[in-house]
Image: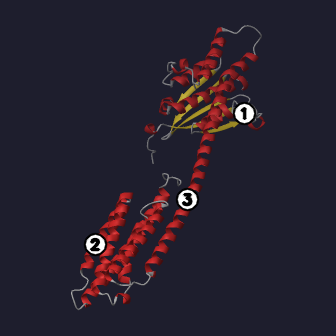
Amino acid sequence: MTLGMPHGSGAESAANALSRATLALGSSALILAAALVALRSINAHGPGPWPALLLLIPIAALMVTTFVRRDLPSMIAYLLLGSASIGVYTAVILHDATNTIADSPYILALPQIAFIYTIAPTVLGARALAFIVAAYVAGQAATLLAALNAGVALSFDFMTAAAAVVITVTSGVSLLLDRRNGRELRTVERALRDTSAMSYQQEIESQVVALFHDTVLSELTVLSHQQPGPLTPAQQAALRRDLAMIADGAWWPDDEAAASPDDGIPPRVAAVLAETRAGGFSVDVAGDLASLHRLTPAVATAVSLALRQALVNARQHSGVQRAEVVVDGAPDAVVVMVSDAGRGFDPAAVPPDRLGVAQSVLARIRDAGGEVQLWTAPGNGTAYMFTLPVAPEHAWEAEE
């Protein structure tokens, strides 16, 4: 296929262009033949070869029919009826001007040229070459039979032979180019499919790594900082929930998805805030909270998980017990700010195997089609800004 086009459309477009061009040439040849017949009839002392004009009409009708239909039955009918018309046409011309036909060989060659040129591109593929040869042979055979019946010895028709060679070479070269282009385009197709599959696999792997970090690894990190002893019921429930979620391939636990809204906040965002506050960390929420409902479910899930990890990082590493979440709505986006006034950090100093910020926050928002900015430095706190696309039906026109 060509890029942005259905498979085979490039070859078909080239065949259509070639078909229109050869139809025009064939029509011109047929018109010239009719003009020569008319001039010979006008200048004739007797009745003249006027009936030959009528025999050009079937050829013209077959040319149009073949151009429109382009199927095998039409090609066969074209060969049979067209060669018959050429044979009778030749017989009429030779009967009228047996002794002078050598002075004007074009009058016999032009209908055959029209016959050959019209059939050339109408059958796509290698069959076109076979039909060109068949049209040339059928036309020549019909002409020779008419000449033998009239007792006339015709010289070799170089004009028709040259026309047949030209259109055969043109069609052959076009066929070779189409096949070469087809191979190249199929190679591009395979490369695009492979690239798409790799991108999809990397996206899934990124989501799985981020989810594993957000759940099991986060729970284990919390456990590593507490005194040895049995797990609390809440910790046991959290670990069972996280393991079941990963085993089921879910991106969000059902119990959190069903959490009740908090002041109009979507359930999953409300669940994140409730979980964070339950751990003794204070979160102040302000702004246009209703704008969060304008997000698609996939984007809402991504921002909820990224918000969850940002608040986990603030609770574990900021050295303060409070963070702020501010929401603002734009015509085609929702902006979420998450900030704390803690100790901050140097992003460049974070080891590459630490996935909290890179995968669970930054990559997650970008994979959801959003943009994310991070401002932080040692001693200056941390702030994230998520710019998230809204669902198309929830966008509005920007004010001028």
Quadrant of residue 383 within the rendered picture: top right
Quadrant of residue 52 within the rendered picture: bottom left
Q: Secondary structure at mark 3?
A: helix
Query: Mark 2 vs mark 3: which is more N-terminal?
Result: 2
Q: Secondary structure at mark 2?
A: helix
Q: Residue at x 66, y 11 (%)?
A: 236
Q: Residue at x 60, y 48 (%)?
A: 190
Residue 343 in view in this figure: yes
Tag 1: residue type? Asn
Residue most extreme to the left: 47
Distance between mark 1 and mark 2 Cα atoms: 91 Å
Q: Picture coordinates of residue 173 (x, y %)?
A: 54, 67
Tag 3: residue type? Arg
Give the residue at mark 3. 179
Say if 24 sits above or below 322 in the image: below
Distance between mark 3 and mark 1 Cα atoms: 64 Å
Label 3 CA crowd tier, 10 Å (few <14, some 14–19, many 20+): some
Query: Mark 1 vs mark 2: which is more N-terminal?
Result: 2
Q: Secondary structure at mark 1?
A: loop
In the rendered view, does 164 fall on the left or right side of 189? left
Distance between mark 2 and mark 3 Cα atoms: 37 Å
Tag 2: residue type? Ile
Give the residue at mark 2. 57
Dot in front, 1 or 2: 2
Give the residue at mark 1. 380
Q: Residue at x 22, y 89 (%)?
A: 46
Say if 81 sits above or below 317 in the image: below
- Mark sitting on residue 9: none
Quadrant of residue 226 within the rendered picture: top right
Which of the pair 21/100 is nearer the observer? 100
